[in-house]
Amino acid sequence: MVRFKNRYFTTEIIPLDNGHTAQPLNLKTYDILKSVLAVTEQIHGEFGAAAIRNGLEVKYCNESTQVAIIRCRHGPHRLLASSLPFLSRIGNRKVQLQSMYTGATLVKCYKFLKKFHQEKMSEALKMSRTEQEKKKVLEIMSKTKYGL
């Protein structure tokens, strides 16, 4: 039997809608898959879409942190990586996808996310000016597993 290798793309989904900044993204994994396949077909043609379709899956999607992890097979992951920056719409929302990390396992992606969130939290703690802001940041840190 042959083992199938995968690559996991950790991406940040940045909404570009000016009027909907207060609303959460409300993204469905199906919408992300459909948009990724469409942009890959647009750039690499039917060959690119068919190559990535087999192992394509959204493994993690967090609306509050706007982070998604997309799984793809090892060979055609280059096609997916080259087409992700051109993704401009997911569903009916205008977005920009920023690739943060490419890993071989989900564990490594989760470790990267943990480190990324810890850095963001410590940055927010340093940027807070009043005691109330510091208390809010510390409260968020205590509720999450990403505490310092």
Image (spheres, helix red, strand yellow):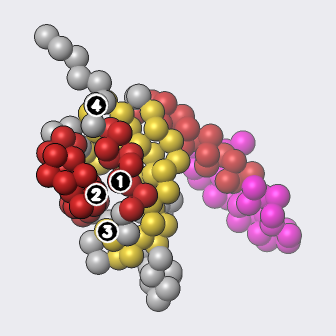
Dividing the image into 4 quarters, which one contains the C terminus?
Answer: top right
Rounded to the nearest angstrom, the CA distance separating label 1 from label 4 is: 15 Å
Residue receiving disc 4: 75
Q: In screen coordinates, is 114 left or right of 70?
A: right
Residue at disc 4, secondary structure: loop
Q: CA distance from mark 1 to mark 2?
A: 7 Å
Do the CB atoms of the residues marked 1 and 2 lie less than 8 Å apart? Answer: yes
Residue at screen point 31% across, 68% down:
90
- In this rendering, the label closer to the viewer, 3 or 2: 2
Q: Earlier in the sequence, mark 3 or mark 4?
A: 4
Q: Nearer the viewer, mark 1 or mark 2?
A: 2
- Quarter-of-image position of residue 39: bottom left
Please tell me which of labels 1 and 4 falls first in the chain.
Answer: 4
Q: Are marks 3 and 1 in contact (CB under 8 Å)?
A: no
How much space separates mark 3 and mark 2, taking CA atoms? 16 Å
For residue 1, what is the image quadrant? top left
Q: Residue at x 29, y 24 (%)?
A: 5
- Disc 3 is placed on an element classified as strand
Name the amino acid type tagged 1.
Answer: Ser
Residue to which mark 1 is pinned: 83
Residue 93 shown left or right of residue 140 in the figure: left
Span of residues in magenta: 123-148
Kind of residue at disc 3: Ile
Q: Which residue is mark 3?
A: 90
